[in-house]
Amino acid sequence: MKARVFVTLKNGVLDPQGKAIANALHGLGFAGVGDVRQGKVIDIELAERDEARARATLKEMCEKLLANTVIEKYEIELQA
């Protein structure tokens, strides 16, 4: 089973990289760009075939390593 984990900063946490991206886009003439938040995408292949167990394992991975849950949130997407 394949999974994709999206990790982004929680709302209210300052995102200096997102602000730099927005400024650069404005400088390139993309005036219609508003707030930009950046994050990371992690693709993981699991041997697990049971969806519930795969989600539980991925949640544990996120809580222990993939996301700093104090300032980041994560979203898990399973792929067939």
Image: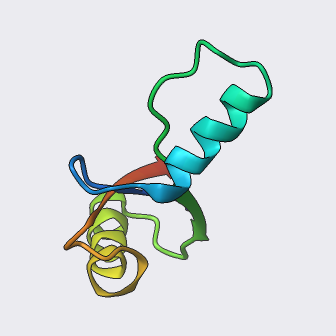
Apparent side of residue 28 relative to residue 31 in the rendered image (left or right): right
**Residue in the image at 33% along x and 56% along y:** 14
**Quadrant (top left, top right, bottom left, bottom right) of the N terminus:** bottom right
- Expressed as whole percent of the image width and height from the top left, the position of residue 57 reads 33, 76
Q: Residue furthest bottom?
A: 64
Q: Is residue 6 visible?
A: no
State the colouring used for the structure image.
rainbow
**Residue in the image at 25% along x and 67% along y:** 71
Apparent side of residue 28 relative to residue 26 in the rendered image (left or right): right
Apparent side of residue 24 relative to residue 39 in the rendered image (left or right): right
Q: Residue furthest front?
A: 27
Image quadrant assignment for residue 25: top right
**Residue in the image at 23% along x and 72% along y:** 69
**Residue in the image at 58% along x and 69% along y:** 44
* Position above or below: 49 against 37: below
- Expressed as whole percent of the image width and height from the top left, the position of residue 36 reads 49, 37
Q: Nearer the viewer, residue 20 or 55?
A: 20
* Position above or below: 74 against 58: above
Apparent side of residue 12 relative to residue 36 in the rendered image (left or right): left
Q: Nearer the viewer, residue 7 or 25?
A: 25
Q: Nearer the viewer, residue 6 or 46?
A: 6
Image quadrant assignment for residue 31: top right
Q: Is residue 52 visible?
A: yes
Q: Residue furthest right?
A: 28
